[in-house]
Amino acid sequence: MKELLIVLGLIGAAVLLLSVGVILRKDHSFRSQHIHQNKRMKQDGIHCALSEDKLARKEHKLKMEN
């Protein structure tokens, strides 16, 4: 039982410390982690897997029609 309380205390402390950044953030907004909204990846021509798949399927369909 003692070990369980210690583990729960450590987990609670970790959650509290991780949330400090969220609570103290001035603008209360976060940069998007999605690839399609990242300027650097757009410049390099990198797209998300869904966009790449959609483009590849479209190109493949056009090749099959010709």
Image (spheres, rainbow, N blue to C red):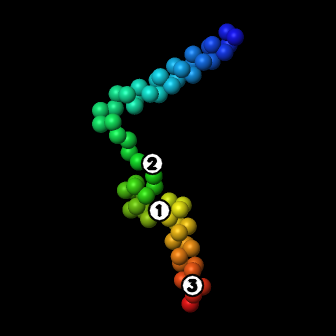
| Residue that mark 3 sits on | 63
Q: Do the CB atoms of the residues marked 1 and 3 lie less than 8 Å apart?
A: no
Q: Residues within 10 Å of mark 1 (few under 14, many from 20)?
A: some
Instruction: Describe the element under mark 1 as helix, strand or loop.
Output: loop
Q: Is residue 41 left or right of residue 50?
A: left
Q: Amino acid at mark 2?
A: Gln
Residue 17: image location, x then y, percent: 46, 23
Q: Quadrant of residue 39?
A: bottom left
Q: Is residue 55 above or below residue 62?
A: above
Q: Residues within 10 Å of mark 3 (few under 14, many from 20)?
A: few
Q: Residue at (38%, 41%) from the top-left corner?
A: 30
Residue 65: image location, x then y, percent: 57, 87
> Which numbered disc flags the more N-terminal residue, 1 or 2?
2
> Which numbered disc flags the more N-terminal residue, 2 or 3?
2
Q: Is residue 6 above or below residue 66?
A: above
C-alpha separation, residue under disc 1 versus residue under disc 2: 14 Å
